[in-house]
Image (tube, rainbow, N blue to C red):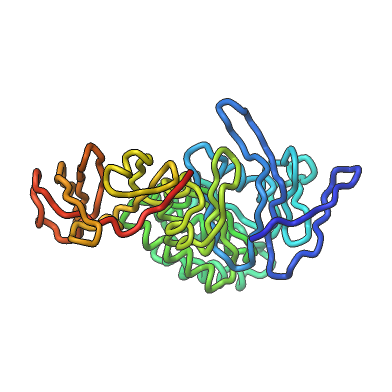
Amino acid sequence: MSNQSCEVSEEKDFQLLDIPESRIITVQGVTKLYSKEPFSGVSSASFTIEKGKVVAIVGESGSGKSTLLKLIYGLMTPEEGAVFFKSEQIRGPEKKLIPGHDSMKMVTQDFSLNTYAKVYDNIASMLPNTNLKFKSEKTEEMLKLLRITHLSQKRVADLSGGEQQRVAIAKAIVTEPEVLLMDEPFSQVDTMLKSHLRADIRRLSNKLGITIVLVSHDPVDGLSLADEVIVLRRGAVVEIGTPASLYSSPQSLYSAKLLSDCNVIEKEQAEKIGIVSMHQTIAIHTENILVKDGDTSHTYLVLDIFFKGYCEELLLEREGVRLRALNLEVGKYALGQAVPVYIKKYLEFN
């Protein structure tokens, strides 16, 4: 992803220059503000999206994720900047009779389904009646692809949230859009079904070659599903990278806290537990705090133990500094026990 220059005419239209064939979406200096205090909207956002990628836009609540998705689709007009599909500027509702770009489809949080119609009819309604055989075959193909063939004759109103989500996706992709936009696709799906739906979305992208852009408040969605993650804070792009790079080597404390369950301590606290740093803030992932002897291990007191199934989370304390660590040997330690702790790795931020 990279920034891209543009030219502005007197009519305030934008022209994108030297666009690579691999690029499908360009967001150039886009601003759309609702209010400054408390902040609401998008501010000077710039990034690009390559064809066939799964991109997750993540950020805390109110960071502008859904607004940015609507700007990409053309449901809103930016106050500054522009959004491009390939080299074509995406027009907002003021200049387009039916808002939304023709080569994209968007799955909203409310799914936009006809709740009293059958699943089959919801999907088939997106196709014209000019070729009924093709319409039937294409609808059946989408039912099979989303693994909802057994639901085809059920009313949408009788489905669970996860089942409705699959119907909404099938309805969106039956017309073979080049880009699928998804607003909080897992918000109404329980934990058990989330992993299956994530796998299905990845499979759709690989099988159909669709570029998928999704927004989520849950960082796990981005880390487990996306090729690239865009981190938003107060409407601005903080950083962009692969899930692995943003998790292990984030450039900002905000990203570190957003994308991981890390311990955050200040410089003075770090010194008490043997970490000498020139930086003001230290972040330590729980999995990098090892309850074992090491070259720089210190003794900590076990204050609390939280059972998490395959592991435990230990609340440890030394010199008034508290840290959370993962323990894979469930039941090994007891409350009040003194244990050796070795900090394998930490991140530093000013």
Residue 87: x, y in percent? Answer: 78, 60
Position of 115 with respect to 135 (left or right) is left
Q: Nearer the viewer, residue 81 or 137?
A: 81
Outermost residue, right side: 10
Position of 3 with respect to 233 (left or right) is right
Position of 142 with respect to 19 (left or right) is left
| Image-quadrant location for residue 336 | top left
Residue 348: x, y in percent? Answer: 43, 50
Q: Nearer the viewer, residue 249 or 31?
A: 249
Q: Classify 203 as above or below 48.
A: below
Asked whether residue 23 appears in the rendered view, the answer is: yes
| Image-quadrant location for residue 11 | top right
Residue 94: x, y in percent? Answer: 77, 40
Asked whether residue 261 appears in the rendered view, the answer is: no
Q: Nearer the viewer, residue 28 or 183?
A: 28
Q: Classify 307 as above or below 209.
A: above
Quarter of the image where the N terminus is located: bottom right
Residue drawn at (57%, 70%), measured in percent from left and top? 138
Q: How many marks?
A: 0
Residue drawn at (67%, 59%), measured in percent from left and top? 2
Residue 223: x, y in percent? Answer: 44, 58
Q: Classify 136 as above or below 287.
A: below
Residue drawn at (40%, 54%), measured in percent from left and top? 220
